[in-house]
């Protein structure tokens, strides 16, 4: 019997204008920080973060992230952090910036502060990074000995981000319960390295419930650039519930299939993480004995949120069986999480990919979308 393991960040802060208080939380961790953000994010939130850190007399070294969470970029920023004698690493931005900040912090043995500017993935709270090649192909998961020390989510910043980011985060978060449930059933292991706790199971279930209740309203809130209770609920679901739920609840087929899609060339690379995960989730549901009613519940929500549900919508309309087999092979390599819940071959996964595509097409025909 494996041990139950649950891991989480030390502190999670979420609210409208939360960045204004960041200095008060960071000063408990240290007074020499390196702040990492990409070019666009510097204007959106990075400069504000620095301003509020300075208010609490925290010194900052500022770095422009080059866009890819690759080993080379992680090394480049680690060198800057060492030169600046930073003890606190603050990542401001999207998943890849945050994953790079975690790697830098681990390399210098520092404190990790994560400031997501979108609710587009569940990367912020986890103690792992996804490492990509410089061309953006999934390489590996990198695990750390601790989760972030502090996560600060400013919902005013999130409400100002394009709606596509929120819908992508909802898709990533909708995979959480689907994947955790399958890992629990199969008694598989989670990203935390043990079996699922009751706590993680409850969090993953609540994540799903919150999204089906509030995703529509939150999506409209972001269109109106407004912070509402519905948006706060969905931001927490996308970030905290999904983050804890995937890491300590378990990943299975949906994310393995997402990783498989990164292995092929083409326009699919223009899709967000969550958009690929949305389709991956439908594939996982197709691999399981799920009812028509349950599968259609997901398809309907994805369509409402303008998420892709068919191969055509993930830019693979003309994909041949050989190409899909390539995706399926990448999704079923030995290290992949699919094996925590499924005993399937690449051929089974390829069938499920074509089936998921057909289920969505049939649904669209039925409802005339
Ligand atoms: Zn994800």
Image: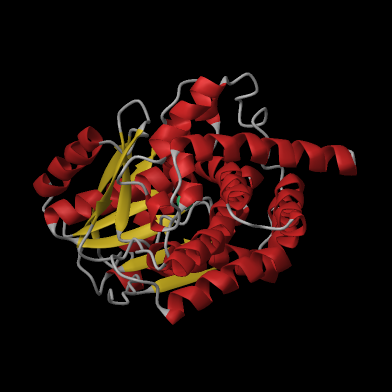
Q: Position of residue 29 (x, y in %)?
A: 23, 70
Q: Can residue 54 be seen?
A: no
Q: Position of residue 99 (x, y in %)?
A: 33, 49
Q: How is the image coloured?
A: secondary structure
**Quarter that holds the N terminus:** bottom left
Residue at 45% from the left image edge and 46% from the top image edge = 344
Q: At x 40% / y 68%, what residue is drawn?
A: 187
Nearest the viewer among 310 and 224 is: 310
Q: Residue at x 48, y 28 (%)?
A: 325
- Picture quadrant where residue 173 is located: bottom right
Q: Which is more toward the observer, 6 or 115?
A: 6
Q: Is residue 102 above or below residue 212?
A: above
Q: Is residue 346 above or below residue 106?
A: above
Tell me if residue 184 comes above or below residue 104 in the rendering: below
Where does residue 36 sit, x and y in percent of width and height?
31, 46
Give the mark count: 0
Could you tell me residue 185's position as x and y percent?
A: 48, 68
| Relative horizontal placement of residue 137, taking residue 87 as reference (left or right) | right
């Amino acid at each position: 019997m494996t041990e139950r393991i649950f891991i989480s960040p030390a502190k999670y802060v979420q609210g409208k204008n939360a960045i204004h208080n960041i200095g008060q939380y960071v000063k408990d961790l240290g007074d020499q920080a390196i702040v990492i953000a990409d070019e666009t994010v510097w204007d959106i939130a990075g400069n504000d973060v620095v301003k509020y850190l300075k208010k609490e007399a925290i010194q900052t070294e500022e770095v422009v992230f080059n866009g890819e969470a690759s080993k080379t970029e992680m090394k480049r920023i680690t060198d800057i952090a060492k030169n600046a004698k930073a003890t606190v690493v603050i990542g401001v931005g999207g998943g890849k910036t945050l994953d790079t900040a975690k790697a830098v912090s681990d390399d210098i043995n520092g404190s990790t502060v994560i400031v997501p500017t979108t609710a587009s993935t569940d990367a912020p709270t986890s103690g792992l990074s996804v490492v990509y090649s410089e061309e953006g192909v999934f390489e590996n998961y990198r695990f750390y000995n601790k989760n972030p020390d502090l996560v600060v989510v400013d919902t005013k910043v999130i409400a100002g981000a394009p709606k596509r980011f929120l819908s992508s985060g909802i898709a990533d978060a909708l995979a959480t319960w689907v994947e955790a449930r399958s890992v629990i059933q199969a008694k598989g292991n989670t990203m935390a390295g043990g079996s699922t706790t009751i706590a993680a199971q409850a969090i993953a279930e609540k994540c799903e419930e919150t999204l089906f209740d509030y995703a529509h309203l939150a999506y409209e809130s972001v269109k109106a650039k407004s912070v509402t209770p519905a948006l706060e609920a969905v931001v927490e679901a996308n970030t905290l519930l999904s983050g804890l739920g995937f890491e300590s609840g378990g990943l299975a087929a949906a994310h393995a299939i997402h990783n498989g899609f990164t292995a092929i060339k083409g326009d699919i690379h223009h899709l967000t993480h969550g958009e690929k995960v949305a389709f991956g989730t439908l594939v996982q549901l197709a691999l399981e004995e799920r009812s028509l009613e349950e599968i259609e519940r997901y398809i309907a929500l994805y369509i409402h949120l303008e998420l892709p549900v068919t191969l055509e919508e993930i830019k693979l309309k003309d994909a041949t069986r050989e190409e899909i087999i390539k995706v399926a092979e990448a999704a079923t390599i030995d290290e992949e999480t699919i094996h925590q819940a499924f005993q399937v071959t690449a051929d089974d996964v390829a069938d499920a990919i074509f089936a998921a595509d057909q289920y969505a097409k049939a649904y669209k025909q039925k409802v005339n979308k």
